[in-house]
Image: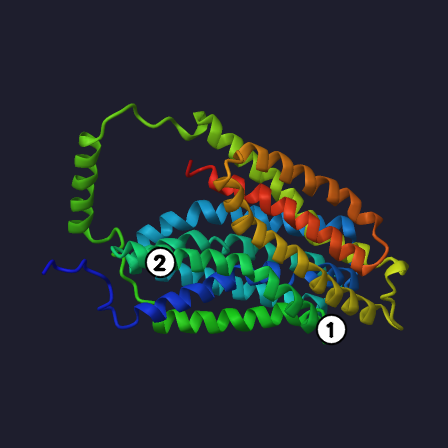
Amino acid sequence: RPTPPPTYSYLPTCYHSFTVALLCILVDVIGIQFTAPSLVPYCVSMGIGVDQIGPLYTARYGGQIISNILMPPLADKYGRKVVVMWSIGGSMIAYIIQGLAFRYEGSEFTLMFTGKLIAGLFGGTFPIILTYITDISMPDLKLLKTRITQAVATLMAAPVALQPLGGAIATFGLYLPLLVSAGIAFVGLILTQCFMVEVFKPEGDKEEGDALKKSDEKKEDDSKGPPRPSVWRDTPLLTLGASFFFVAFFIVGQQIQPPLLLERSSFGLEEDSETRTQERIALTSGLVAIPTSLVTAFVMTVGYLSLSKRGVRDETCVLVGGLVASITFFVVPMCKTVWQLCVINAVQGAGCGMFMGAVQAMPSK
């Protein structure tokens, strides 16, 4: 009989490692999705103006860009597990700083900005986790495909589950979602240390490094065709990067717009105190995010794949999806009730899902 293909099933904690890897993905996004409904109300309750909330998002996503550039090389040098633990530990510290900012009167904005920046600088975990999943799944390609799909699904499903839960917890204190995030990060840190198996040998192993170098040189000699262009001369890649730059503006707008809109008297969320009002706004913001997240995830996967199989071009999906999302973004401020806001957000989610599904598929094509 033919010998079955080798797998990594001999690793006793391989499946435990994969479960912990999914938890690490949640720790990475929990500071954004779980705290999104309460962030604006929390800042408003501390006297941070709307014009100062924008720089907080800039610090978070600006640090994320730096992290995405620096962390993968560090993971190759020191190992996946070590860098993931650095990331989780830094995120935990960032959440604690933000959660305790309300206690230091006069320094709230400084502490929030510092916490957001630290969260961004230690937030580049997702590409490392995908690489780690590849390490523990190869050479079983079927297992690898299943696990990558589960990891992406975890990332996409996070807003659906985390935002309503974060809004509900915020009714007991606008700072609580941040401290709960810190607690989850601490649990993730412990589980990573105990159950994540490091199967990748860092660059410190000289013999392995020399062997890999010779292998790469041989592959390069055997390869045919013109050399790959420089990244800075790759026009399609730069155009795609520019599109994500503008998508970031849209995503931040999606997170800031609902809490500010719900402060209007037409929504009927006023309470007898400013704190109670902001807590109710946080809860409603989390509920409003449900239709947006559900429709975005569905259209981004099932909807886009169905259109693609029927011969609809990616350019059409980008243009139609972007147009729908842009129009609804301008229509949202016209809403007078929570139901209207939910409906418009669902339509906006359909546009975002069609656009993002096509854009994410373009690099592989």
Q: Secondary structure at mark 2?
A: helix
Which residue is pictured at 53% across the width and 30% down the height? Answer: 239
Q: Is residue 267 visible?
A: yes
Taking the view exactly as shown, the residue that stands out farthest to the bottom is: 172
- Residue 58: x, y in percent? 63, 47
Question: What amino acid does circle 1 point to?
Answer: Thr
> Relative to residue 339, is residue 22 drawn left or right?
left
Taking the view exactly as shown, the residue that stands out farthest to the left is: 1
> Relative to residue 326, is residue 265 drawn left or right?
right
Of residue 51 and residue 348, the one placed in the foreground of this image is 348
| Marked residue nearer the N-terminal end (2 or 1) | 2
* Residue under pointer 2: 133
- Residue 315: x, y in percent? 55, 32
- Residue 156: x, y in percent? 54, 56
Q: State the mark number for residue 171.
A: 1
Marks 2 and 1: which is nearer the front?
Answer: 2
Q: Is residue 8 above or below residue 121?
A: below
Q: Real-space Cα distance between discs 2 and 1? A: 37 Å
Of residue 308 and residue 87, the one placed in the foreground of this image is 308
Which residue is pictured at 80% across the width and 55% down the height? Answer: 340
Q: State the mark number for residue 190.
A: none
> Relative to residue 84, is residue 183 drawn left or right?
right
The local crowd at label 1, few if under 14, some if 14 to 19, many if 20 or more residues have their Cα within 10 Å, is many
